[in-house]
Image: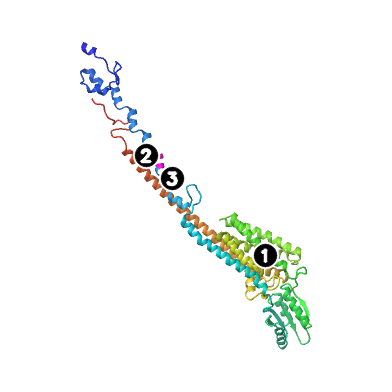
């Protein structure tokens, strides 16, 4: 090596030995002289300075890329709340989870509200008429009675009855007194008269109707006939007023129990029916015990309890179904249309036939009328005439069970529909998120600095030689 080369100061990667800050690029731009100069131009330190990993990382920094198109950025642009509009619409809730109602829904609810108000008003007016009108017009109207005896005597006695009480009796003729007694015990007639050439006998059944029995007894006494009561009522309550009260309390308690069970255990029909069956058994036993204690009925504790339990079960199951389908408004309509009118239309303290035409017949198809008639048949007539009220109560029970089944079917259908809608919304949301992520990734790749490479790549820019 010549002395001129030895006198030349050595160079480093970025700064000369003399402490100057002259960049290597300026030194590399000078003409290379000698082997040492060529080695300096392509020294590893110099190449590392040109493509410093930190510098390259600055161009394509992973965090910088994530900032441009990372998961958090994608979530900010199209986060869960904005990427799932279908799910929000299906749930019907706002961003805070509270129920939301659009103006269209409010406009739709207004006619429904007016309809409920109108229906309740009409039902209340009907209940008022059913309570007042029958008691304003109680009279003897086509009371079923029988007359037993020979043809001539029967015809004469019918004429006498028509003259004494025109239109009061619907007379059926029987061959003898035994047939008349049997018909009375079967509750085909309220009683009647057995006449012959020498005597007359009045047959009554105060257990069926104390008011009608009193009328027949008075007529028989006026004719000089003896009176025979084949189905006497309880002496402590000859008018059966206690039975009318018990029927009303049973139906009201069943209605209240049905509404409570429908609200406490919604969409659980099995629990509702079990609860109502328990209430029916307990309340039936309690009512029968009270009726025995106050003297309204004598004996037949278990049969009266069974009748009361059936009535409570029938009304309660119907109330559960109505409440499940129509809510509290439906229960209110049931109260006004069925329960309240039944208080007066049952005819338990008089006779259904003594009510205005049509009202009494309607009352026998309502729960109170059927319950009272069934209890009278079991307690005073040995089961005679029990079939019709029994079928009425069973009919109410079947109707109630059908309503409960319809409510459960509607609930299952709505649940399946919501599940399908939620699944569709989730699939659409996943598809939207996937598309958003792909788009953000493509934008991040396109936004990379030209000529820059990711860390660890061997394809970076080479230093000038």
Disc nearer the start of the sequence (2/1): 2
Q: CA distance from mark 2 to mark 1?
A: 74 Å
Disc nearer the start of the sequence (3/2): 2
Q: Mark number for residue 310?
A: none
Q: CA distance from mark 3 to mark 1?
A: 57 Å
Seen from the viewer's position, the closer of residues 65 and 417 is: 65
Identify residue for label 2: 69
Most distant residue in the bottom direction: 152
Q: Position of residue 115 (x, y in %)?
A: 53, 64
Q: Position of residue 264 (x, y in %)?
A: 60, 54
User: What is the tally of numbered marks visible in this picture?
Assistant: 3
Q: Are marks 2 and 1 in contact (CB under 8 Å)?
A: no
- Which quarter of the figure is the N terminus placed in? top left
Identify residue for label 3: 80
Disc nearer the start of the sequence (3/1): 3
At a point 68% along the width and 70% down the height, the residue shown is 373
Seen from the viewer's position, the closer of residues 265 and 306 is: 265
Seen from the viewer's position, the closer of residues 301 and 362 is: 362
Q: Secondary structure at mark 2?
A: helix
Is residue 35 visible in the rendered image? The answer is yes
Most distant residue in the top direction: 3
Q: CA distance from mark 3 to mark 2?
A: 16 Å
- Which quarter of the figure is the C terminus placed in? top left
């Amino acid at each position: 090596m010549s002395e001129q080369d030895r006198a030349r100061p050595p160079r480093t990667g970025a700064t000369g030995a003399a402490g100057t800050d002259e960049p290597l690029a300026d030194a590399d731009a000078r003409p290379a002289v000698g082997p040492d100069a060529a080695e300096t131009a392509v020294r590893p330190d110099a190449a590392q300075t040109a493509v410093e990993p930190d510098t390259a990382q600055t161009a394509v920094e992973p965090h910088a890329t994530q900032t441009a198109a990372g998961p958090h950025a994608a979530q900010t642009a199209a986060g869960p709340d904005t990427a799932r509009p279908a799910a929000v619409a299906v749930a019907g809730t706002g961003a805070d989870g509270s129920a939301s109602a659009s103006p269209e829904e409010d406009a739709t609810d207004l006619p429904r509200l007016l309809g409920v108000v109108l229906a309740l008003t009409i039902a209340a007016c009907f209940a008022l008429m059913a309570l007042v009108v029958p008691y304003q017009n109680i009279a003897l109207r086509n009371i079923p009675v029988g007359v037993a005896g020979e043809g001539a005597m029967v015809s004469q006695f019918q004429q006498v009855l028509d003259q004494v009480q025109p239109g009061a009796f619907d007379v059926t003729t029987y061959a003898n007194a035994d047939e008349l007694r049997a018909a009375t015990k079967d509750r085909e007639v309220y009683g009647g008269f057995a006449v012959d050439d020498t005597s007359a006998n009045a047959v009554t059944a105060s257990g069926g109707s104390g008011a009608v029995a009193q009328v027949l007894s008075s007529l028989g006494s006026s004719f000089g006939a003896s009176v025979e009561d084949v189905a006497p009522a309880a002496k402590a309550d000859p008018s059966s007023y206690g039975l009318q009260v018990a029927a009303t309390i049973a139906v009201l308690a069943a209605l209240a129990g049905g509404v409570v069970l429908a609200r406490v255990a919604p969409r659980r029909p099995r629990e509702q029916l079990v609860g109502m069956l328990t209430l029916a058994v307990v309340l039936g036993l309690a009512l029968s015990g009270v009726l025995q204690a106050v003297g309204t009925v004598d004996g037949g504790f278990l049969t009266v309890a069974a009748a009361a339990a059936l009535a409570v079960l029938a009304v309660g199951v119907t109330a559960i179904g109505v409440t499940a389908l129509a809510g509290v408004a439906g229960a209110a309509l049931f109260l006004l249309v069925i329960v309240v009118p039944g208080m007066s239309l049952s005819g338990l303290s008089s006779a259904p036939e003594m009510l205005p035409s049509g009202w009494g017949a309607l009352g026998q198809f309502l729960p109170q009328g059927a319950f009272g008639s069934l209890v009278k048949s079991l307690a005073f007539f040995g089961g005679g005439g029990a079939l019709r009220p029994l079928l009425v109560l069973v009919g109410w029970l079947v109707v109630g069970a059908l309503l409960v089944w319809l409510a459960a079917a509607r609930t299952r259908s709505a649940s399946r529909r919501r599940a399908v809608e939620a699944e569709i919304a989730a699939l659409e949301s996943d598809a939207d998120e996937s598309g958003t992520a792909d788009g953000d990734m493509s934008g991040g790749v396109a936004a990379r600095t030209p000529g820059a490479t990711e860390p660890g790549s061997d394809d970076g820019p080479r230093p000038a030689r």
